[in-house]
Amino acid sequence: MRHGERDMTIWGLETFLFTTPTSYSPSLNKLANNGLVFTQFYVSSPICTPSRAGLLTGRYATRSGTYPDTFKPDDIGGLPLNETTIAEALKPVGYRTGMIGKWHLGYGKDGQYQPSHQGFDWYYGIPYTHAECSCGPCYYPDAPCDQGNCQPQYVHCPLFANTTIVEQPVDLLTLDAKYAALATDFIRFNAQEQTPFFLYYAFHHLHIPIYSGKNFTKSTIRGHYGDALAELDWAVGEVMDTLEALNIDNNTLIFFSSDNGPALALKQLGGSAGLLKCGKSTTYEGGPRVPGIAYWPGRITPGYTTELASTLDLLPTICSIAEAPLPLATLDGVDISRVLFHGQTSPRETFYYYPGEPEPYVGVYAVRFKQFKAHFFTSGAGNSVSNDPDCKPGNFRLRKPPLLFDLHEDPSEQFDIAGRPEYEGLLQKMIQLKRDFDYNMVWAPSQINRGQNEEYQPCCKAGCTEQLVKCCQCDALDGMPQVFRSTCIAVPRT
């Protein structure tokens, strides 16, 4: 391939979306109407950190130690530096790599696990979720700050440009305008230099605390959630419009997805899983089954596919497209190029479900084989509290015999067919699939359980001697790398 034929952009979305009559998302609709929509698409974990690790490495988080739960600002551990990310896989074949937004794969001592140390040439964002920051940020214009969505034990949210903090606390009301401006800047820069690029754009929307900028607050009838969705959709449009204006959209693969299902416990602010059962942190379909849209004008035929695929498949697929060698590691992803470009059957026939907090002695909770899913263990989660008692926390259950569902006929997992004689052989096969997968899984030591150190938290001031939360506050842009300066000082949209 020529360099100009290998440009690609990938971005991620924080929360499972269902477009409803009260939501307006023209850019996402355009992406879906002109791209290939996966209706059977999965993340490797139903919670943030392990899901993001799976996307970037093509490996379940159990292999990298990015479990259980998520990294916090003061955690000692992070995504191990010997793991190969998509960015690191592409650099040897000439790609420039950039990451914008929410990292959530660890910070560590002196930022040793930041994106800049994981293969990304450019990085602009917050190293974890904005829900794990001290009180201070405002979430809507003309509204009081300190609205209760804060973690006072942590420092204020830092905004990084590469390895330099350029704002602390971050101004959420202008954050997405800066993100979108820098994303388009990154695309233009590489297009002008005719350099192939990889951009990982990971939105903070629509994770709580829900926030939105001046141009989007009160812009919809769906309340704060709808306003945040509108801002996200606008940012997607900015990226798409830039690719089209530069006439490189036909040389660029865009893949749009999420990192987990909705937090149903948050009700109107948590999103919806539609007809899927439960949500975030669970292994019911509402937890790991998410939107997946592949867009590449002239290369990918628009439409819908029921072929099985996962974010785990992005690394091997991208390496195939870019003619980059695969990492020398055990991969759980497969190359789905033949689904994308030729409409053929997926090489993926199985998918293994881990909860947000997996345990080696339990292994995978459920196994999917073709359209069938067997639950060996089930559990609800605090994130998924709803009217369905199966979704509530504290009800971990061994299912013996396993539950069995045909997800094509019963995507809501309501009708157990395990007792029907015609499925006895199938169920035995799926029991063996679980045994084999669990037996062959090599669990890496947990990076999240390594412990915490308050002094590891990112701080814009060196040598703080007073309380970190009070000390780590900076408004100036001193030390910002020149490549970011014009974008971040003169942002035209707020």
Image (tube, rainbow, N blue to C red):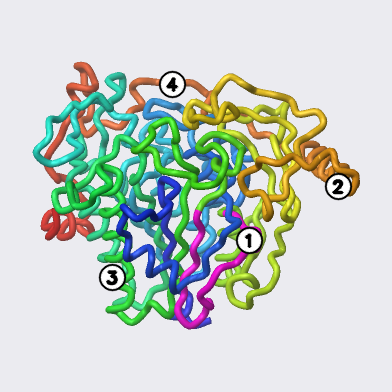
Query: In this picture, is 381 found above or below 221?
Result: above
- Image coordinates of residue 184 in percent, x first then y, are 27, 65
C-alpha span from label 4 to label 3: 39 Å
Q: Are marks 2 and 3 in contact (CB under 8 Å)?
A: no
Which label was assigned to residue 452? 4
Which label was assigned to residue 423? 2
Q: Which of 14/182 is in front?
A: 14
Instruction: Tell which circle, 4 or 3, labels the residue nearer the N-terminal end.
Output: 3
Residue 200 in the figure: left or right of residue 188: right
Q: Are marks 4 and 3 in contact (CB under 8 Å)?
A: no
Residue 460 in the figure: left or right of residue 256: left
Q: What amino acid type should be assigned to the residue bearing mark 2? A: Tyr
C-alpha span from label 2 to label 1: 38 Å
Q: Which residues are magenta?
A: 291-310
Instruction: Tell which circle, 2 or 3, labels the residue nearer the N-terminal end.
Output: 3
Give the SS element for disc 4.
Answer: loop
Closest to the camera, between mark 2 and mark 3, is 2
Q: What amino acid type should be assigned to the residue bearing mark 3? A: Phe
Which label was assigned to residue 326? 1
Residue 22 in the figure: left or right of residue 414: left
Q: Is residue 305 magenta?
A: yes
Name the residue carrying label 3.
189
Give the class, few, some or many, for how many residues have Cα within 10 Å of label 2's Cα (few <14, many ≥20).
few
- Image coordinates of residue 274 in percent, x first then y, are 49, 47
Quadrant in the picture for residue 309? bottom right
Image point (26%, 34%), residue name? 157
Q: Are marks 1 and 4 in contact (CB under 8 Å)?
A: no
